[in-house]
Structure formats: C-alpha cells, structure tokens
Image (spheres, grey):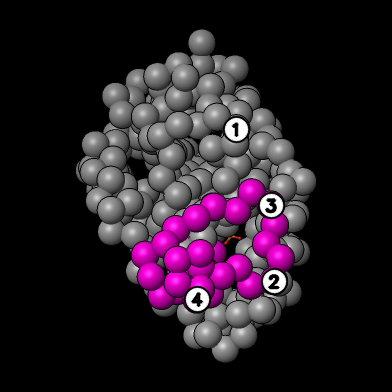
C-alpha cells in the first residue's frame, strides 16, 4: 500500500466537513459473501434476468425464493469484517455522516452503523406483491411466503432490474450527496445506475473522492485518491492514520 497516498487520503477525510461513504458488494467479500461481477461473482454463474426481475418472479416465484433463501442462509452465517467495523467507528467519532450502500446483506446495520441508506433494499424485508403489507424474516425463507393480510405472494423487498429505487430513500440520498464534500467509494464496480453516479455528484460540487477497490473501475480515472487493496485491510490502515 502506498503510505503517502494513504496519508493524503486520511487527511482529506479528516479535513472534510461532511464526509460520506458509498459501498458495494466488494466490502462484504472478506465476510465471504460473493460479489456480483468479480471472480466467482453471482452474475457470472446465474442469469440475473431469470432471478432478479419482476417478470421472473411472476413466472417462477418458487425458483426466485429458492435462490433468495440460499443467499439468506449464506449471509446468516457471515459476520461483518474490519471494513464494516471501521465505518462504524468513523460514524461514532462523528467523522462519517452517512453511509449509502447498494448491498442488501444488512451487514452495515449488523456491524452497528446507524445512518445507513440501503438503496437496493434489504434481503430480509418482505413486501406483498398485491397489498401494502411489509414484514421481516428472522430466518431464511421456506417455500413461497404468503401475505398474512391478503394471502398473495410475498417477495423480497429488494430492487430488481427494471425497477425504480424507493423515492423516499432517494430523496434522503440526494440531500446527503449535495451536502458532502468528501466521499469514500468502497468495493463497487460502479456499473449500476444510479448509484454509479453518486460519487460524480459529490465531485461535480468540488468534493474529494477516495476509492478503495482491488481493481480499477469506471470511476478510477476521476477520483482524487485510488487506494488499491482489500477493503478489510485498507480501511483499518486509513483509520490508524486518522488520529
Ligand atoms: P459488483 O460485483 O459489480 O462489484 C464488486 C466490486 O468489488 C468490484 O469492483 C471488485 O473489484 C470489488 N472488490 C472485490 N473484492 C473486494 C475487496 N475485498 N475489497 C474491495 N473491493 C473489492 O458489485 P456492486 O458494484 O455492488 O444490484 O454491484 C452493484 C449492484 O449490481 C448490486 O447492488 C446488485 C447487482 O446487480 C441489485 O441487487 C439491485
């Protein structure tokens, strides 16, 4: 790891008035949760159009639930890693103001982060395909859960391809992006919109962008500090410099 660059990035975080974070699947990789597009990524082995679209759910709800129950089982065995824990520490110290995540694994909240915006939803929350019912699973789903209010199918409350993000969450997120003067972007390929553009909003307003990733992304050319390395090692290393 380049020590000078790391120190400069740590100083940029400390000097910011409103520092935020954007995370993607790569931050949970060291917790043993597969990413989507990298080596062993879910979308390399499974067809997103068959598993993560509203029409796929209508066609074959039991297949979709089988896949989500498998992911819920896998995630329930995993623990937050030092990268999640560093973000908790920064929030507790008042350095990190908000955390925006594309992850549906719930690990930021399990780690103890409080001000978290899960823009792609949460794997454990349920919503009815017919009425306004919302519920929460405490353990991996079995079969197709049905709505206690209207008996129709429940689905995971995650954003599928072709769906819009929750407008209430997005309102909060855009407010935070407009306030931010520094943003750390951790473990995302920056290929899925609108999240891929969030750092650019901060950048366009003159903010600093710090990227942590094991490989360059679409964003790397525009960031102020590219920190090449695993999130679970790079974040604690940054933290050590932020005394
Ligand atoms: P991707 O799987 O597209 O990208 C994961 C990124 O993490 C890649 O850039 C990797 O290089 C990086 N990475 C892997 N291991 C890492 C580590 N230990 N430390 C740091 N970086 C690491 O995941 P996302 O960008 O999050 O959407 O994907 C965005 C969205 O696409 C997901 O939220 C999901 C998916 O379809 C929905 O489910 C709606």
- Report x, y in % for residue 63: 68, 79
Q: Nearer the viewer, mark 1 or mark 3?
A: 3
- Report x, y in % for residue 107: 60, 42
Q: Is residue 57 visible?
A: yes
Residue sitting nearer the eye, 233 or 208 = 233
- Residue at position x 63%, y 39% in the image: 231
Region of the chain picked out in magenta, as a range:
129-158
Q: Determine the image quadrant of residue 206.
A: top left
Q: Nearer the viewer, mark 3 or mark 4?
A: 4
Asked if residue 210 lies in the magenta stretch, the reply is no
Which residue is label 3 attached to? 139
Residue 152 circle label: 4
Which residue is label 2 attached to? 143
Residue sitting nearer the eye, 26 or 73 = 73
Q: Nearer the viewer, mark 4 or mark 2?
A: 4
Q: Which residue, as the protein is rendered here, is positioned at the far top?
A: 243
Q: Quadrant of ligand 1?
A: bottom right
Q: Nearer the viewer, mark 1 or mark 2?
A: 2
Q: Earlier in the sequence, mark 1 or mark 2?
A: 1
- Report x, y in % for residue 148: 51, 64
Q: Earlier in the sequence, mark 4 or mark 2?
A: 2
Q: Secondary structure at mark 4?
A: loop
């Amino acid at each position: 790891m380049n020590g000078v660059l790391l120190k400069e990035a740590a100083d940029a975080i400390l000097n910011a008035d409103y520092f935020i974070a954007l995370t993607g699947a790569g931050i949970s990789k060291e917790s043993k949760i597969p990413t989507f597009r990298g080596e062993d990524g879910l979308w390399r082995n499974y067809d997103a159009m068959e598993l993560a679209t509203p029409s796929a759910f209508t066609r074959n709800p039991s297949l979709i639930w089988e896949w989500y129950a498998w992911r819920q089982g896998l995630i329930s065995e995993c623990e937050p890693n030092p990268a999640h824990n560093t973000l908790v520490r920064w929030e507790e110290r008042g350095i990190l103001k908000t955390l925006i995540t594309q992850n549906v694994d719930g690990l930021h909240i399990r780690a103890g982060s409080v001000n978290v915006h899960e823009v792609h939803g949460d794997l454990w929350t349920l919503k009815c395909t017919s009425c306004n019912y919302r519920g929460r699973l405490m353990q991996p789903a079995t079969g197709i859960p049905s709505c206690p209010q209207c008996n129709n199918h429940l689905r995971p409350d995650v954003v599928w391809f072709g769906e819009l993000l929750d407008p209430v969450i997005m309102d909060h997120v855009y407010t935070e992006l407009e306030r931010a003067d520094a943003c750390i972007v951790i473990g995302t390929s920056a290929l899925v919109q609108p999240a891929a553009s969030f750092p650019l909003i901060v950048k366009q307003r003159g903010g600093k962008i710090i990227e942590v990733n094991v490989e360059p992304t679409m964003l790397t050319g525009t960031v102020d500090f590219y920190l090449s390395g695993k999130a679970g090692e790079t974040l604690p290393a940054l933290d050590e410099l932020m005394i």
